[in-house]
Image: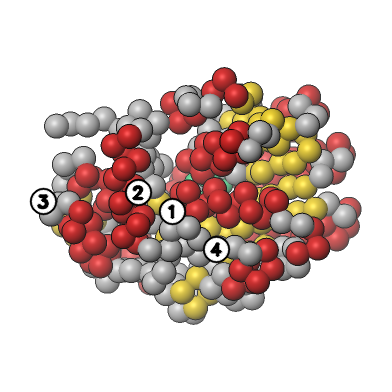
Amino acid sequence: MSILITGGTGFVGAELARTLVGRGEEVVLFDVAPNYARISDIQDKVKVVTGNLAYWAEVLNVVQENNTKGIIHLGSMLSVPSNANPWASFQVNVVGTMNILEAARLLGVGKVVFSSTLATFGLDCPPVVTDTTIQRPITMYGCGKLYCECLGRFYNSRFGLDFRSVRYPAVIGPGVRTPGVAQWNAWMIEYPVLGRPFDCYVEEDTKCPILYFKDAALSTDLIYQAPRERIKTMNYNVAGVVPTRTAKEIEQVVKEHVPEARISYNPDQKVMDYFRAARTEVFDDSRAREEWGWQAEYPDFQKVVADFIEEIRVHPDRYGIVQEN
Ligand SMILES: NC(=O)c1ccc[n+]([C@@H]2O[C@H](COP(=O)([O-])OP(=O)(O)OC[C@H]3O[C@@H](n4cnc5c(N)ncnc54)[C@H](O)[C@@H]3O)[C@@H](O)[C@H]2O)c1
């Protein structure tokens, strides 16, 4: 029986696929635009199916055809594309998740893990965001993700579906290309390593909780594997790097690794409006820790930067990185 990862050739999905393959699982990756470079090392060990979450028949077919025992649902339009095209975002993120839940229900799939986001919080965020903080998203992306958290909870109570989700903060790692309000965290490391200047689009004192992509994959795998009786809260914050650093503090750590880094600041006021409304100092993940033993492997930012640089050096093709010098 197989585990289906939607968005399976994406940034987090490919890393998770690597873990599952390593454990001997049969893995199917469903993606609208498969990125084969990201999975070149495991391509002969997984099945890749091209398809669109918004198309019910394609979802039903991939779940039915592959004797699916579990679904890890990562496929999504991210924040900036969702705001740019809310109509498409609704079809992919909301209808697509409904399609996954329905397919799981009708075909008796054991469990569904969903990837949600810190962006389900938003308006007037308190400095410490916990699993019981009121969720008032201010983006199309956040609205859709929050609805799907609630939809999963409904499928659990109404149909007994084993649904769980993790809310990532900003996920960082090499090769992020999709524009986003928090991508500066990753680009402030990647650009200097590649010898490029980085003009940061937030103010120096801006803070945003971050999670290294390997920890995003790890948390998703851990919640997938957790015994059902441990899942009480159902939708969980997962934090990564502690403490949350300002842009300037990130710059300082990067310069310890790349002293010649050229970083300037040219804040985008729309992005700053977002961070002024949704400023979070602490992304509290105590329930994930207590209920299913979550613990980040990369809570230390120095360790993140060192591994990030090593990944670029060892696997530039995997991350679509072109060295200019
Ligand atoms: N990257 C972050 O900072 C972040 C933060 C919080 C939550 N998340 C969530 O984590 C999950 C994984 O994100 P990621 O960082 O790997 O992003 P990603 O963009 O690298 O991966 C998403 C994948 O979904 C695929 N996809 C998009 N639309 C699809 C559709 N209609 N049908 C099938 N596949 C489709 C894309 O081709 C891509 O491979 C997403 O659900 C995202 O919302 C990401």
Looking at numbered disc 1 in the image, what kind of residue is underneath it?
Tyr
* Residue at position x 46%, y 74% in the image: 282
List the residue tagged with mark 3: 260
**Callout 2–callout 1 Cβ contact below 8 Å:** yes
Locate residue 292, reporting x and y percent.
67, 63
Q: Which residue is mark 1?
A: 212
Kind of residue indicated by mark 4: Gln
As drawn, the label of residue 156 is none
Q: Secondary structure at mark 1?
A: strand
Q: Which residue is mark 2?
A: 307
Residue at left offset 43%, top offset 53%: 212
**What secondary structure is marked by label 4?**
loop
The numbered mark, 4 or 1, whose residue comes first in the sequence reads: 1
Q: Is residue 80 above or below residue 319?
A: below
Quote the CA–CA distance across marks 2 and 4: 18 Å
Residue at 61% across / 51% down in the picture?
220
Going from N to C along the chain, the mark reached first, 3 or 4, is 3
Closer to us: 56 or 70: 70
Q: Nearer the viewer, mark 2 or mark 1?
A: 2
Under mark 3, the amino acid is: Glu
Q: CA distance from mark 3 to mark 2?
A: 19 Å
Which residue is drawn at the image coordinates 57% and 29% (left, top)?
32
Q: Which residue is mark 4?
A: 295
**Real-space Cα separation, disc 3 to disc 4, in angstroms:** 34 Å
Return the x and y of residue 262 as percentages of the image width and height: 13, 52
Pointer 3 or 2: first along the chain: 3
Is 299 rendered above or below residue 130?
above
Mark 3 CB near ligand 1 (8 Å cut): no
Q: CA distance from mark 4 to mark 1?
A: 12 Å
